[in-house]
Image: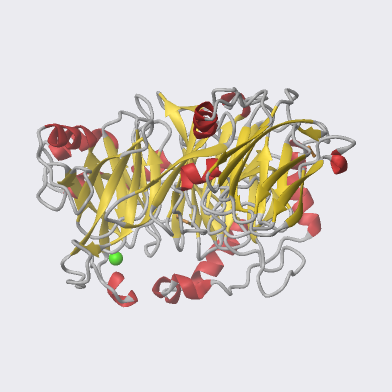
Amino acid sequence: MQELPENGQSRRRFMGAAALAGVAGATGLGTAVMSRESFAAAAGDARQKYMVEPGELDEYYGFWSGGHSGEVRVLGVPSMRELMRIPVFNVDSASGWGITNESKDVLGHDNTYLNGDAHHPHVSMTDGRYDGKYLFINDKANSRVARIRLDIMKCDRITTVPNVQAIHGLRLQKVPKTNYVFCNAEFVVPHPNDGSEFSMEKSFTMFNAIDAETMEVAFQVIVDGNLDNTDADYTGKYVVSTCYNSEKALDLAGTMRNDRDWAVVFNIERIEQAVKNGNFKTLGDSKVPVVDGRHGSELTRYIPVPKNPHGLNTSPDGKYFIAAGKLSPTCTVIAIDRLDDLFDGKLKDERDVVIAEPELGLGPLHTTYDGRGNAYTTLFIDSQVCKWNIADAIRHYNGEDVNYIRQKLDVHYQPGHNHASLTESRDADGKWLVVLSKFSKDRFLPVGPLHPENDQLIDISGEEMKLVHDGPTYAEPHDCILVRRDQIKTRKIYERDDPIFASAREQAKKDGITLEADNKVIRDGKKVRVYMTSIAPQYGLMEFKVKQGDEVTVYVTNLDTIEDVTHGFCMVNHGVSMEISPMQTASVTFVADKPGVQWYYCNWFCHALHMEMRGRMLVEKA
Ligand code: RUQ
Ligand code: CUA
Ligand code: CA
């Protein structure tokens, strides 16, 4: 074993106070690299556990955010093998996401955003346990929230949150079930934001709740300051968000002026009641009820927390909200069972709900839990994970002379989020910890000026954390979630009445077409609809004829009923490509602007005669 606590200490002294002044400046730090021998010794048995032999299956599904790649990635844990990618806030050439009509039904047919910035993936819950129905994720770049159906692992809804900018922190209601998706808009803007006003003083931002089933915004809450991360409790009543810019400053120094910013607590019951009673307004064209939760409101409480706090994580026993201090070396432990008294005015001071504030190291960003009373906080500047005991931290806060720090483990390098298996649910099992390090520096072969990031897998099942795996990743998995494999149930083939292709079915009905049987061309003025089936290795239509300038929509219905016999449809030289999985219908619209023979072919390998699966669009000169 490396002498990690000592390393940690010495580097902390080396960093000193200068590091506090600028988190961003600290990325070039040297950190001792574990030698091959010491790694092998340290990992020992743990490495055996992480080995998933060829042909074996992983114990956990991991859902990784793809950061500003806009996608979601599915990994097996502990192998850390990438299983699938789910395009969301991006365009995907393989599946046709952003190209097909079905994906445009979700993205919006006038969607002009080809980018996104996905941060926080979270799986829907029933009674505080993952129910495997949906995964939700935010898009900071374009203020959106997406829902992914986990039975087919495809995005089925995207909602743009009105009157705000940059949806960042996102968490789900845990109890009684995920009725709401809570999400924070980070940046303050004036209202109306029509160019008549630019001052920060007159600007505000809002906390938002989206109905998880309808994906409509249920309400918005105006707050003081700004909003960063958020989490919900295990009663369904309280949600807390961190604020790093209580100063409402524009300049960097200004955002660090106050020693304490705050965590704002939202009383969901009271907010629902206010909306029900009609105590709300609306903003601009939006019909979403907006309530005022600024200082003095009965709907919120503001708990002073040091300093530019970032992560906010509920402990799996439901007792604590823990805010990570970022510019303070501390985490702030908030007792959830004191929040009723706080709202009822029975406490003298907002800080009376704080029951511990352990000092952990430099740059605490996010905390996760093992379900055995320990917390694991990432230390960005120290490049470490600090394991600490919550009960001991509380005893220390009450004056007892106890050491609450259990271990500090070097990670490589500058970690943001970390996430332990099942940690956001009552089932937190303390087996695996994933640490998402923002920099990999010397851990992998160089691939140009830009390096991959490094997702490290750590065995936390024993007393000591043991690093077992380095995983290079492309920009930028902020966060991930680990779900037990039995909590996810995927379909083998599509149901024919799947809502994903409801609009294709509707159009077919109007055209008198049976998608499962007909291979036909319907002309409707300059619009041509081509309906075809596919069975490996053939399309139902070897060729079809259109006129130059026609707007052509091709509907392909895959009649193969064997799991994973997926076909593609690619029209050469037309920018058209899509996936059609077993019993799925997919469609794509394009203009046949080139006269002559235009080949189409299947681009998902499906059969020994996959190469032969092709046909011709014959375009008559206009
Ligand atoms: S928040 S580390 Cu979205 Cu921490 Cu990224
Ligand atoms: Cu069908 Cu390849
Ligand atoms: Ca601040």
The residue at the point 49 percent across, 53 percent down is 118
Nearer the observer, 521 or 36? 521
Measured as percent of width and height from the top left, residue 441 is found at: 67, 68
Measured as percent of width and height from the top left, residue 353 is found at: 23, 43
Measured as percent of width and height from the top left, residue 399 is found at: 30, 47
Counting the numbered discs, the total is 0
Residue 226 in which image quadrant: bottom left
Nearer the observer, 514 or 80? 514
Query: In what quadrant does ligand 3 lie?
Result: bottom left
Location of the C terminus by quadrant is bottom right
Residue 472 in which image quadrant: bottom right
Direction right: furthest residue: 608
Viewed as shown, does residue 550 lie left or right of 227?
right
The residue at the point 29 percent across, 45 percent down is 208
> Does residue 363 sit above or below 406 in this rendering?
below
> Does residue 412 sit above or below 277 in this rendering?
below
Residue 399 in view in this figure = no
Residue 306 in which image quadrant: bottom left
> Does residue 100 sit above or below 23 in this rendering?
above
Direction front: furthest residue: 622
Nearer the observer, 78 or 45? 78
The residue at the point 63 percent across, 25 percent down is 491
Q: How is the image coloured?
A: secondary structure
Residue 553 in view in this figure = yes
Nearer the observer, 213 or 475? 213
